[in-house]
Amino acid sequence: MTIDLAATARDKDIKYFLISFVDLFGVLRAKLVPAAAIGEMQENGAGFAGFATWLDMTPADSDMFARPDPESLIQLPWKPDAGWLAADLWMDGKEIEASPRALLKRQIAAAAAQGWRMKTGVECEYFLVNADGTEIADARDTQSKPCYDQSALMRRYEIITAICDAMLSLGWAPYQNDHEDANGQFEMNWTYDDCLKTADRHVFFKYMVKSLAEQHGLRATFMPKPFPHLTGNGCHAHVSLWDSSGETNLFAEPDGEMGLSKLAYAFLGGVMHAAPALALLFNPTVNSYKRINAPVTLSGASWAPNAVSYGGNNRTHMVRIPEPGRFELRLMDGAANPYLLQAGVLAAGLDGIAQDRDPGTRSDLNMYTEGHRAKGLKKLPLNLWEALGVFRRSTVLKERLGKDFCDSYAKLKRKEWNAYAGAISEWERQNTLDC
């Protein structure tokens, strides 16, 4: 039975709705719609000009309509007279195939056709910084190893608990909050769920953290590497595949190596195979490549991968297997588009199962100190341009995600790289002005 948003507005005293979508670059777009008009919007969608966002469109294209998904409704905990809705994009009577949420839903449908559903959790790291982002907000947070620092955590008690209280009220079942490895950095964890729900919540979480930080006179950033000497913002994903009922974890196998099934290792094999190409989705900005392949930070480790490898409960690898029934993919960073993150993992995993891809033998090396001993490992791209080239050559991603999406995404990312390459940095002025 479809949820009637007009009736919901009356029942929950919602006066306005944010009808939102995420473009290809992960920017959250919205229109604010009064409750009196939500019935029409639920049927027909809110109109947008696609070219005005990061979608591969022109001013000559037809109107784009964002049709809200009633199942995604979140009543803003700090502004309960407003409701947020994730929307699906349509044009000329057809869903826009290259839109991020549609892309994920197609991967979900492909998994469902095999009797599977992917469940995930994400670890969203962020910094609390000053208004212009040049310094962390807490001048007393100076330890070289600040991770789990109770004093620094409690100095941000008001904002951390405001966010956690909001997640509790929404039923997300948050279970821990901590100061992370960098000065000024935090992480908050909530319970895993079906990957579309996790993606919708991931989108809203970033908006919520930024909004509540502003209310507390702070600024929150998920930028992958805001400070060169500090650990960057990762967005690790914990992944498992379940049966269609969602009751049986198909990755769990008590007699399997490290508690994982053959299905899990084939899925992992697909992720390992596609990882260099997936970097453009998981590490989508110029700044992203200052987090992976990074030099040692103030804390002593970057906590980011430097090669395509997997191991047991070993955080120096791109993939960690912390316990039976799931693996943790540590490649993604805070700039990753929540829908493309999930779609990329699922697409690669399904390819791995279909092709029975072998992830190889797990490594127990410390990749930060002994990585040179690992032979034959694929390397991660060194910058956005290199990632773009690998992405464009990937037949797996074109087949699984669609050529139209891959072409559009690559086209926009090429423009972004060209804009970056044409800019003159302060480093260049300081080091080459008098050459």
Image (spheres, rainbow, N blue to C red):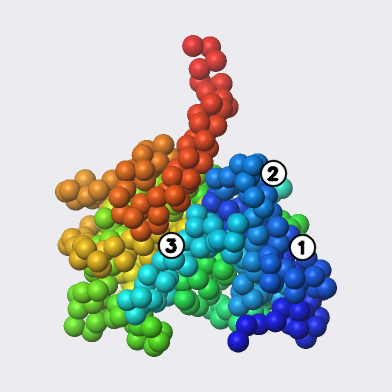
Q: Alpha-carbon neighbours of circle 2 within 10 Å: few (<14), some, or many (≥20)?
A: few
Closer to us: 380 or 73: 73
Choose top left, top right, bottom left or bottom right for residue 314. bottom left
Q: Mark yes or no: residue 161 visible.
A: no
Q: How many marks?
A: 3
Residue in the image at 32% along x and 65% along y: 349
Residue contact at pointers 3 and 1, CB within 8 angstroms: no
Q: Which residue is mark 2?
A: 132
Closer to us: 275 or 429: 275
2 vs 3, front mark: 3
Q: Element at badge 1?
A: strand
Residue 128, percent from left and from top: 63, 56
Q: Identify which amino acid the numbered label 3 is placed on.
A: Ala
Give the mark nearest the N terminus, 3 or 1: 1
Residue 18, percent from left and from top: 72, 65
Give the mark nearest the N terminus, 2 or 3: 2
Mark-to-mark CA distance, 3 and 1: 28 Å
Mark-to-mark CA distance, 2 and 1: 27 Å
Number of the label disc, if any, that sits on residue 343:
3
Q: In the displayed structure, does residue 12 sit left or right of residue 62? A: right
Which quadrant is home to the N terminus?
Answer: bottom right
Q: Is residue 158 above or below residue 137?
A: below
Q: Identify which amino acid the numbered label 1 is placed on.
A: Leu
Q: Alpha-carbon neighbours of circle 1 within 10 Å: few (<14), some, or many (≥20)?
A: some
2 vs 1, front mark: 1
Closer to us: 423 or 266: 266
Q: Identify which amino acid the numbered label 2 is placed on.
A: Asp
Q: Which residue is mark 1?
A: 32
